[in-house]
């Protein structure tokens, strides 16, 4: 089911989310709804707080060819390097800017079966995961923007600055 996306300013977007204590059918349903909502809005990541559910859960899929990454109670355990790239957000429509993030990360989380998982990644996947983990901590990317990029200049900026 496609859920309404909360738009800034809304206090839920700057409120840290609570850990999920028990993975249940409700958790599975929310994961499914987050995926439906993210794809309906052409997103590549979405956190539960963006649909008003204040739990540490997010979904990421960089492109339709990629597996869907479902993370329950994710924790960033390692990061290295740095890179600057452009970001946007479903909860901040028409706002874009450059943000400095770690280039490589390792994140630990639980999958929908409750199995502990560890993922090490880099590049745009690492950026997207960090963006979603910030959401779970109540941090919006606008707090980290180095340079605002007008919407009509986003494609041009990406073509001129892409290193991936």
Image (cartoon, rainbow, N blue to C red):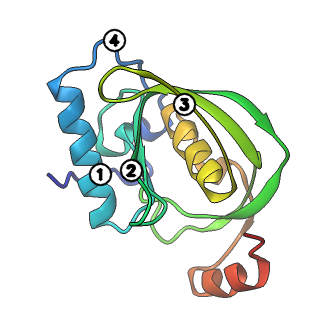
Neighbour tally class for label 2: few under 14, some 14-19, many 20 plus, Cα within 10 Å: some
Give the image quarter of residue 63.
bottom left
Counting labels gives: 4
Where residue 40 appears, as percent x and y from the top left, is: 27, 65
| Spatial CA span between label 2 and label 1 | 8 Å
Where residue 7 appears, as percent x and y from the top left, is: 38, 54
Residue pointed to by mark 4: 21
Neighbour tally class for label 3: few under 14, some 14-19, many 20 plus, Cα within 10 Å: some
Q: Nearer the viewer, residue 44 or 113?
A: 113
Residue pointed to by mark 3: 137
Nearer to us of marks 1 and 3 is: 1
- Say which element carries label 1: helix
Nearer to us of marks 3 and 4 is: 4
Residue pointed to by mark 1: 35
| Spatial CA span between label 1 and label 3 | 20 Å
Q: Who's the residue at 22% across and 33% down the image?
A: 28
Nearer to us of marks 4 and 2 is: 2
Q: 66 left or right of 151?
A: left
Q: 52 left or right of 46?
A: left
- Which of disc 3 and disc 1 is earlier in sequence? 1
| Spatial CA span between label 1 and label 4 | 21 Å
Residue pointed to by mark 2: 68
Q: Who's the residue at 77% across and 49% down the image?
A: 103
Name the residue furthest right: 81
Residue 49 visible: yes
Quarter of the image that includes the C terminus: bottom right
- Say which element carries label 3: loop
Q: 91 left or right of 131?
A: left
> Is the Cβ of the residue at disc 2 closer than 8 Å to that at disc 1?
yes
- Say which element carries label 4: loop
Where residue 89 appears, as percent x and y from the top left, is: 49, 59
């Amino acid at each position: 089911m496609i859920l309404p996306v909360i738009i800034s300013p809304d206090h839920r977007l700057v409120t840290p989310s609570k850990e999920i204590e028990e993975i249940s059918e409700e958790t599975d349903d929310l994961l499914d709804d987050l995926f439906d909502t993210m794809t309906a809005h052409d997103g590549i990541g979405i956190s539960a707080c963006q649909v008003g559910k204040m739990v540490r859960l997010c979904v990421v899929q960089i492109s339709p060819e990629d597996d869907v990454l479902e993370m329950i109670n994710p924790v960033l355990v390692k990061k290295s390097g740095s890179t600057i790239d452009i970001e946007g957000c479903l909860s901040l429509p028409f706002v874009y800017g450059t943000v400095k993030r770690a280039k490589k990360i390792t994140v630990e989380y639980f999958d929908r079966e409750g199995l502990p998982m560890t993922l090490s990644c880099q590049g745009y996947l690492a950026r997207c995961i960090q963006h979603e983990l910030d959401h779970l901590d109540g941090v919006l990317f606008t707090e980290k923007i180095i340079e605002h990029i007008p919407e009509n200049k986003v494609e041009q900026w990406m073509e001129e600055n892409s290193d991936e």
